[in-house]
Image (tube, rainbow, N blue to C red):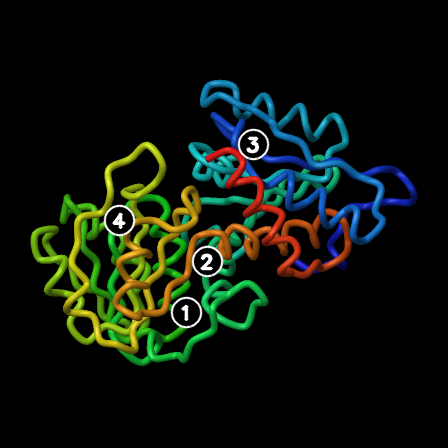
Amino acid sequence: MTSGDSPNRGNTPVKAGILGWPVTHSRSPLIHEYWLKMHGIEGSYEKLPASVEGFEKVVRGLVDAGYAGANVTVPHKEAAFALADFADARATQLRAANLLVFKGDAIHAANTDGYGFLQSLGGGSDDRGYDKNWSTNPVAVLGAGGASRAIIGALVDAGVFELRISNRTLEKIDTLRFLCEGTPTNMLAVPWDDREAMLEGCGLLVNTTSLGMSGQPPLDISLDHLPDFAAVVDIVYAPLETPLLRAAALKGLRTVDGLGMLLHQAVPSFAAWFGVKPEVTLELRGLIVTDLEGKS
């Protein structure tokens, strides 16, 4: 979706928000409020709590109330796709949406998670900057849950020739093989006990599990098999430096935290609702980091 698709009309303030359950700790309002102020746009972005049972009713209510749309976080991404009248190619492939745009009575769905992930790897002002060995070497992914779908799809689109995916339940990896159909990417299912050995020769390691998140146990893995040119990504952003990223930094490996993905996936949403494509800046990143540190 581009800025030309914006539902903004005249001088009427545009309203949007984020749907989730729970949604209390979402940093998305900070991101969008920053951009609204930066671009002098009269509008708002709210936290929109919606239970699983009440999700459709809440969404219909937003349409009736004239909202421009909403972001969608756990546990509603699949329900958001199912509810939509129209969906972009990525949401259709993943059967999950994190962006809804309301045009009249019609609900349009998109998925920007993969876009946000790739943008966080390079080219953005908030990344650490590193070469592209990750795209010319095998890539290791930990986890096969909902968070991994968009990331795996994005890596396939980026041309990764081999994906090594490790998960506690191997059968769950098989449900993701459709993402590689019709592409040159080869997907390997790796038993959880072999997750360290699979890192041999990989240019990128991506943790999509919740291990290492505040309140969760740390991810138990040695990085000794990773080449010295590899990068390590953890999509967790609370804490900003997880035990995995700390271990990678101590080995001199390049690290990318989950905040970049959060910031970049919000860009297409803002453009679709408010008609302006915003930038991810160091100032914005600093704002979210300060908030995270204040609530850690």
Residues under labels 2 and 3: Cα distance? 19 Å
> Which residue bears the numbered disc 2?
114
Residue indicated by mark 1: 157
Residue position marked by numbered label 4 in the rendering: 144
The residue sitting at 48% across, 51% down in the picture is 91
Marks 2 & 1, CB-CB < 8 Å contact: yes
Foreground tag (4 vs 1): 4
Rounded to the nearest angstrom, the CA distance separating label 3 from label 1 is 28 Å
Amino acid type, mark 3: Leu
In the rendered image of this protein, does residue 217 appear above or below residue 64?
A: below
Residue 227 locus on image (x, y percent): 22, 75
Q: CA distance from mark 4 to mark 1?
A: 18 Å
SS at badge 3: strand
Dot 1 alpha-carbon crowd within 10 angstroms: few under 14, some 14 to 19, many 20 or more = some
Q: Amino acid at mark 2?
A: Gly
- Badge 1 marks a residue whose secondary structure is helix
Q: Secondary structure at mark 2?
A: helix
Q: Is residue 205 left or right of residue 288?
A: left
Q: Give the mark, 3 or 4, whose residue is nearer the N terminus.
A: 3
**Amino acid on which the number 4 mark rests in the picture:** Ala
Q: Residue at x 27, y 42 (%)?
A: 211
Could you give the CA–CA distance between mark 2 and mark 4, rounded to whole angstroms? 15 Å
Could you tell me if the residues under marks 2 and 3 are in contact, i.e. CB atoms within 8 Å? no
Q: Amino acid at mark 1?
A: Asp
For image coordinates 32% across by 72% down, the residue present is: 183
Q: Position of residue 2 (x, y in %)?
A: 69, 60
Residue 279 relative to residue 157: left or right? right
Quarter-of-image position of residue 290: top right
Label 3: which residue?
Answer: 19
**Which of the marked residues, 4 or 1, is nearer the chain's N terminus?**
4
